Amino acid sequence: MSLADIVPPGVVTGDDLLKLLEHAREVGYAIPAVNCTSSSTCNAVLEAAKKNNSPVMIQVSNGGGKFYAGKDVKDPNAAAAGSVALAMHVRCMAKYYGVPVVLHSDHCAKKLLPWFDGMLEADEAFFAKHGEPLFSSHMLDLSEEPDEENIAICVEYFKKMAQMKIWLEMEIGITGGEEDGVNNEDVDPEKLYTTPEQVYTVYEALSEIGDMFSIAAAFGNVHGVYKPGNVKLSPEKLGNHQAYTKEKISSPLEKPIFLVMHGGSGSTDEEIQLAVSNGVIKMNIDTDTQWAYWDGLRKFEAANHDFLQGQIGNPNGADKPNKKFYDPRVWIRKAEEAMIVRVGESMEKLGSAGKYTASTEPGSPQIGDYSSSSGCAIM
């Protein structure tokens, strides 16, 4: 039975999300989770998934949510509002691309919990009206806190989330580097490697509530971009976590834990493949796709520089218009095209490419009751 036979296209939540991630774990591939900050980057990720016949995750960070809301908005709830707006955009468009899409929120440190609470409020409102949450999953990153506090807060939130079948991703151990205002560049190197005992403690606490959770266990990961070899990854440690928990719970599964990989920029293909073989079902991608998006625009500007110096006048004549070069639909598209290629590369490396034949059925928005006659969603 193919993945398309068990998971529908469009934003997936609840039981469908669990089926998708169980399939990834059983078959042995990971799904790229790409940070997005605009409708343009969201659409690029969706297009990459369609072209590569792959499920995909679109995730928004606190900073990404603020950017989506508009940099001039100073309201304390801007990050939550922007994140919800991004989620609504993806829900409007996902089915038109014919592949499963996981809507996720990225790292949430303790100081950012009001943002998390705002998204949960939106989930609850959407669930009350439509029987499913707005988002598929959320991440709590309390790795800066003591393990006991980290796990205790995760447990309390997971109890709320489980009622709506929202997936929880949590982090134990610390991912180095800096991302979205959380700086771990000077952290004790030992904290970059989570122990099997730490992972099992998380598993033990959360499994009492439900099975829809994943663990981002640190194995030397560092946010940012580095040359291969400059970061010492130890993906074999993930296999140790699986074996330890398997023995503790007498699981019939070789890989009973859903694991997540952060800070993958600069990782070798071999390191990525070993991580996936040890149960990683999701890998975050941000730095590399940021560069790809910019690089597409950079190359377009370099190739058409003389046509981008004024509205009128170019090498073809002093009175020749340049609109077809400076129209945002032209240069933004070049950025999208480069990002699409880069996301596709990640899908190939993670093994998700070709796992889901994109549906050719007509699309529809997933934000309310759908009227096929008008092509609109009724909220």
Image: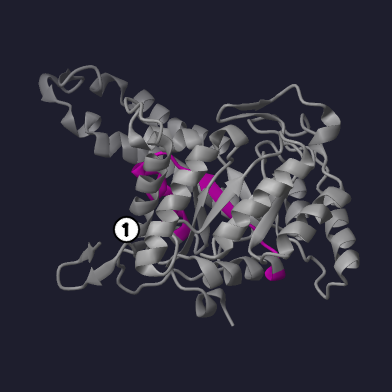
Q: Is residue 161 left or right of residue 128?
A: right
Q: Is residue 270 left or right of residue 78?
A: right
Q: Residue at x 78, y 44 (%)?
A: 148
The residue nearer to you, when weighing 221 against 118, is: 118
Helix, strand or loop for disc 1: helix
Q: Residue at x 73, y 65 (%)?
A: 208
Looking at the image, is 59 positioned above or below residue 131? above
The residue nearer to you, when weighing 121 against 91, is: 121
Q: Where are the magenta residues, as a range?
A: 26-49
Looking at the image, is 256 positioned above or below residue 235? below
The amino acid type of the residue labelled 1 equals Cys
* Residue 212 appears in the figure: yes
The answer to which quarter of the image holds residue 230 is top right
* Residue 268 appears in the figure: no
Q: Which residue is mark 1?
A: 92
Residue 139: percent from the left, percent from the top?
A: 59, 48
Q: Is residue 277 magenta?
A: no
Residue 157: percent from the left, percent from the top?
A: 60, 52
Residue 243: percent from the left, percent from the top?
A: 88, 61
Quadrant of the rendering where the N terminus is positioned: bottom right
* Mark 1 crowd level (few <14, some 14–19, many ≥20, 10 Å Cα): many
